[in-house]
Image: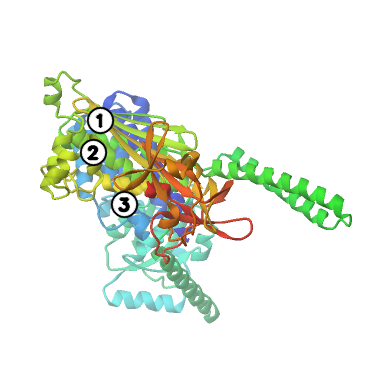
């Protein structure tokens, strides 16, 4: 069986189970007697075990099986939930996540057996006096230690020794004879699979795969192809050549889940064996060649890196809407074809305009529908943070809690994939730098447990995410002193700096106020990553703080990066697009109203001093001989900063599709992409954030 085709499904479902387990174990830590949570954890662990077993990931299967054992005891009331047990379970989840990462990168789980964690789980069972019971109740997936005596008992029934009735060809007889001469073992095996098993071919495949690692299967009944096609009942027989002992071979087979029984003994060639014809021998050789070819193909596929995280789960109603709109699109196309065949030009022109309006309505609705399909709740990113804050609380020795709201807020999938790291850095920053140690909080009269809030909400065409803490706030003087010490600014610059400018220093590369380097902070990698990533997504970051009361980081992001509303403008003879969500207003200003501050052009607009950006100079356009008396200025905003972009002409609002410029074009970051206009002309998209 080629299981590589199921790898993406396995990866997606394992991530969901892991997330569910993390959430449920956090609940269990707070409510140790919550039996519903225990049942939910048991079910997730059981599902993970079955999935890992089906895919042949034995290490993950063993770990989840031992975890399942522990929660089985808790369900039965034979064990209680303790803080130590919760810590061990979290270590299990981290180990499973390591396996998953390895599978994503290499299609294999790696070679880490995580014996230390398995021993911890067993120690938890031992401490409750239930270790032996857990071993007895464990199913056939666990390696089973069986004596030779029990083996003899299990093979006593001749009806189960079906391998004795296998017809062997001359070349197989010779292989057995040569193996015996080299002191190798030859075993006859009959494997019985549980009748309730859904994927019996998969179980058989795992048996064959396990045996290939310790020997050679020289014959099977039914043949390999029939087993792959599930053309067998719930048992199959084999002849195996191996250097391993009978017990070792039996353990390998018994380690596969849903194997009910294994009948195995030393195989001797019967004296009255029927010699198979040469034609049958050739057929068997062909079967073996085909089998080897399939295995090689499968090995080649398994070495390829799977594409993960490319799927989005979509409500069927959204797909129905999409289908209806595509149907309407076909009707519109047929209408245009019909118009093109009309002979009366006047009637034809009227019908053509009607069809174009109809087409415009459909494409607008189609765009909205596709956008809804691409939208993913922000919950898929933030739901891993409670576990992270719990671990940071223990590591830093601070009591803290994370309160999340607005997880249902939706963002485009392309944006969702990118915001995980920035949010993680901001939360770690709040935990380490923001919140004071517990003793210090009590001295200040603050609640013992520090609070970090993460709130998301939609604001027009943007999504706003706020990360707020009730800690000590940002000490601006300390930030300045650290910047001077590290050589980012001079002492004179520090004295002249306003509070906001000083806070902006935090976003500089390699800047940190931490006095000691730890695995949480101090290396100066954090807020600069946040700033670069968010601005790369067309968003911006703001900071507001009050010393002694706390800090709030506010991120604003566009809903989507694919299709946007833009204002089309002209600079000389070239067309440019400015994203509409960054535009505040458009002003007609007299040249005589332009003032100068520090040799920079500014205008006074309703009490606000706004610096001007001459797009013709920045874009290196040809200068004009005579400047007009009035200038058209597009006022754009980034956070609380404003700037006026001087343009030559307004063309109007338009919905545009953003096309990347590609990595081969080395261009200043003030150009964020390009779009293709109706007449086929290419217009560059201005990144107003960079200009501000």
Q: Is residue 484 left or right of residue 315?
A: left
- Residue 448: give its label: none
* Residue under pointer 3: 99
Vertical arrangement, residue 633 with respect to residue 626, above or below = above
Residue at far bottom of view: 278
Which element carries disc 1, helix, strand or loop?
strand
Relative vertical location of residue 41 with respect to residue 236 in this rendering, above or below: above
Question: Quick check: 259 above or below 82?
Answer: below
Residue 294 can be seen, yes or no = yes
| Residue at 60% from the left image edge and 45% from the top image edge | 367
Label 3 Cα neighbours within 10 Å, binned few <14 / some 14-19 / many ≥20: many
Q: Is residue 125 above or below residue 297?
A: above
Which color scheme is applied?
rainbow
Q: Which residue is mark 1?
A: 545
Q: Report, in whole angstroms, how far the alpha carbon at label 3 lies from the one at label 2.
A: 41 Å
Nearer the N terminus, badge 1 or badge 3? 3
Which residue is depicted at the point 39% across and 31% down?
Answer: 607
Provide the residue designation for mark 2: 503
Give the camera-side residue of 636 and 677: 636
């Amino acid at each position: 069986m080629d299981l590589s085709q199921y790898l993406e499904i396995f990866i997606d479902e394992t991530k969901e189970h892991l997330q569910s387990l993390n959430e449920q174990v956090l609940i269990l830590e707070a409510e140790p007697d919550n039996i519903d949570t225990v049942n939910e954890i048991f079910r997730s662990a059981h599902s993970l075990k079955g999935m890992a077993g089906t895919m042949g990931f034995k290490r993950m299967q063993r770990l989840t099986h031992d975890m399942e054992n522990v929660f089985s005891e808790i369900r039965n009331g034979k064990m209680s939930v303790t803080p130590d047990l919760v810590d061990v379970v979290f270590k299990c989840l981290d180990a499973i996540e390591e396996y998953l990462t390895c599978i994503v990168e290499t299609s294999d789980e790696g070679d880490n057996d995580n014996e230390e964690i398995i021993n911890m789980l067993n120690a938890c069972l031992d401490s409750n006096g239930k270790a032996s019971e857990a071993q007895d109740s464990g199913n056939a997936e666990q390696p089973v230690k069986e004596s030779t005596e029990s083996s003899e008992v299990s093979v006593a029934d001749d009806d189960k020794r079906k391998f004795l009735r296998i017809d062997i060809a001359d070349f197989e007889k010779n292989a057995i004879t040569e193996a015996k001469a080299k002191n190798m073992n030859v075993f006859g095996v009959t494997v019985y699979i549980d009748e309730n098993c859904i994927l019996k071919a998969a179980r058989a495949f795992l048996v064959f795969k396990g045996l290939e690692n310790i020997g050679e299967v020289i014959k099977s009944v039914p043949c390999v192809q029939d087993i792959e096609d599930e053309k067998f009942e719930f048992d199959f027989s084999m002849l195996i050549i191996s250097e391993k002992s009978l017990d070792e071979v039996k353990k390998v087979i018994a380690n596969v889940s849903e194997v009910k029984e294994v009948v195995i003994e030393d195989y001797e060639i019967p004296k009255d064996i029927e010699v198979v014809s040469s034609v049958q021998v050739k057929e068997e050789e062909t079967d073996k060649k085909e089998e080897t070819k399939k295995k090689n193909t499968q090995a080649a596929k398994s070495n390829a890196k799977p594409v993960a995280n490319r799927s989005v789960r979509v409500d069927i109603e959204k797909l129905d809407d999409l289908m209806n709109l595509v149907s309407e699109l076909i009707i519109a196309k047929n209408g245009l074809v019909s118009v093109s065949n009309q002979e009366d030009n006047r009637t034809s022109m009227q019908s053509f305009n009607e069809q174009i309006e109809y087409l415009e309505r459909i494409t607008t609705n189609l765009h909205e529908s596709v956008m809804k399909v691409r939208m993913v709740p922000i919950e898929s990113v933030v739901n891993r943070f409670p576990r992270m804050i719990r671990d940071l609380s223990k590591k830093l020795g601070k009591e803290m809690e994370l309160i999340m709201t607005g997880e249902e807020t939706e963002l485009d999938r392309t944006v969702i994939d990118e915001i995980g790291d920035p949010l993680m850095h901001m939360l770690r920053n709040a935990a380490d730098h923001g919140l004071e140690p517990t003793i210090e909080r009590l001295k200040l009269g603050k609640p013992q447990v520090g609070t970090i809030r993460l709130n998301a909400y939609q604001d027009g065409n943007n999504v706003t995410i706020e990360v707020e803490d009730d800690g000590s706030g940002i000490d601006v003087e300390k930030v300045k002193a650290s910047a001077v010490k590290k050589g980012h600014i001079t002492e004179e610059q520090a004295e002249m700096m306003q509070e906001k400018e000083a806070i902006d220093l935090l976003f500089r590369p390699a800047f940190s106020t931490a006095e000691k380097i730890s695995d949480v902070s101090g290396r100066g990698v954090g807020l600069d990553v946040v700033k670069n990533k968010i601005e790369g997504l067309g968003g911006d970051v703001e900071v507001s703080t009050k010393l002694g009361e706390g800090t709030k980081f506010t991120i604003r992001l566009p809903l989507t990066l694919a299709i946007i509303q833009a204002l089309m403008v002209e600079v000389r003879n070239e067309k440019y697009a400015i994203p509409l969500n960054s535009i505040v207003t458009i002003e007609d200003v007299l040249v005589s109203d332009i003032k100068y501050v520090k040799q920079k052009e500014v205008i006074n607009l309703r009490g606000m001093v706004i610096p001007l950006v001459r797009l013709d100079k920045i874009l290196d356009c040809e200068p004009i001989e005579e400047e007009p008396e009035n200038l058209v200025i597009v006022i754009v905003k980034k956070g609380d900063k404003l700037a006026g972009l001087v343009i030559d002409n307004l063309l109007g609002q338009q919905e545009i599709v953003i096309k990347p410029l590609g990595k081969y074009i080395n261009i200043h970051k003030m150009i964020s992409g390009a779009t293709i206009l109706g007449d086929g002309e290419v217009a560059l998209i201005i990144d107003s954030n960079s200009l501000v």
